[in-house]
Amino acid sequence: MLLVFLSCVALGVWQLDRLQWKIRLIAQVDKNLHAAPVPVAEVLRMGAPAAQYRRVSLAGHFDNSKESYVFATDAAGKPVYHVITPFILHDSGTLLVDRGVVPEQRRDPGTRAAGELNGEQRLIGVWRVPDPPGWLTPAPDFAKRVWYSRDLNAIAKASHLGLAAPVLIEADAKPNPGGWPRGGQTVTTFRNEHLQYAITWFGLAAVTFAGWISYHIAQGRLVWRSFRN
C-alpha cells in the first residue's frame, strides 16, 4: 500500500511538472508565431531546438524532382498527403519544406502542375523540429516516396540530400497557383490535460491512504485513545 501511495503521489507531482512545461511551451509558441519572420541564416545559427516555431524567411528554389509525401488525415478523416520538397537556399545549403497538403487524387504532381513552383522563390514558413517516428510507424513506400512520419533524416537520405539542419519549414497559408498544395498546416493548439491527470493521481493517493487507515482501524491496530488523550 505504501508503494502504491508513493507511486500515485510521484505521478501527480510529475503531471504538475508537465503542466508547467506545457504552459511555457504554449506561451513560447504564441510569442514566436506572432513575431516578425527571421532570416533563415540567422535561425540556422540559433540551432534547431531554440528556433522551434519561429517564423522564418528564406530565398532559393525548389527541387521538385525530389518531392516526398507524408500520409495524414484531414479533419474529416480523409487521407491527405503533406508535400515535402527540398528547397535549395542561396548560401546556406538545403532545407525540407512542407508545402502543405493535397488530397489523395492530387498526390501525383502531374495533377497540379500549376503549383509546381520553379525558379527563384521567397517563402515565409514556420521552423519545426518534428517528433521522431514511433516504433509502430509503418515502413515507407520507397517506390511511391510515401512516408508515414516526418522522419527528415530518412527522407533526406532516400533523396541523397545533405540538409543544413534536420528541420522542416512549414509553409504559410499563401495560396499556390492552382490551389495545391494547401499550406498553413502548422498545428498551433496543444492538449493540456495535465492538471486533470494530476488531480486523478492525487485522488488515487488519497483513496489508497484512506483505505490503509480503514483497514488498520478494522484490525484494531490504531489506538485512538492516545489521540484523545
Image (cartoon, helix red, strand yellow):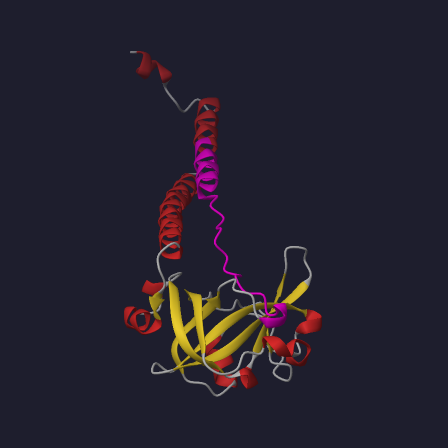
Which residue occupies 55% across, 82% down? 64
Q: Quadrant of residue 72?
A: bottom right
Task: Read off the magenta span.
Answer: 177-206
Image: 103 above or below 94: above
Q: Quadrant of the N terminus?
A: top left
Q: Nearer the viewer, residue 102 or 139?
A: 102
**Position in image of residue 194 (x %, y %):** 45, 44
Residue 67, given in percent of the width and then of the height, sits at 56, 80
Q: Residue at x 44, y 22 (%)?
A: 220
143 vs 61, nearest the viewer:
61
Note whether residue 187 is visible: yes
Q: Position of residue 34 (x, y in %)?
A: 38, 54
Q: Is residue 215 above or below residue 145?
A: above
- Residue 228 against residue 61 in the figure, above or below: above
Q: Which residue lies most toward the top here?
A: 229
Q: How many numbered marks appear?
A: 0
**186 in magenta:** yes
User: Residue 78: x, y in percent?
Assistant: 69, 61
Q: In front here: 63 or 216?
A: 63
Q: Residue furthest right?
A: 105
Query: In the rendered view, does 52 fall on the left or right side of 171?
Result: left
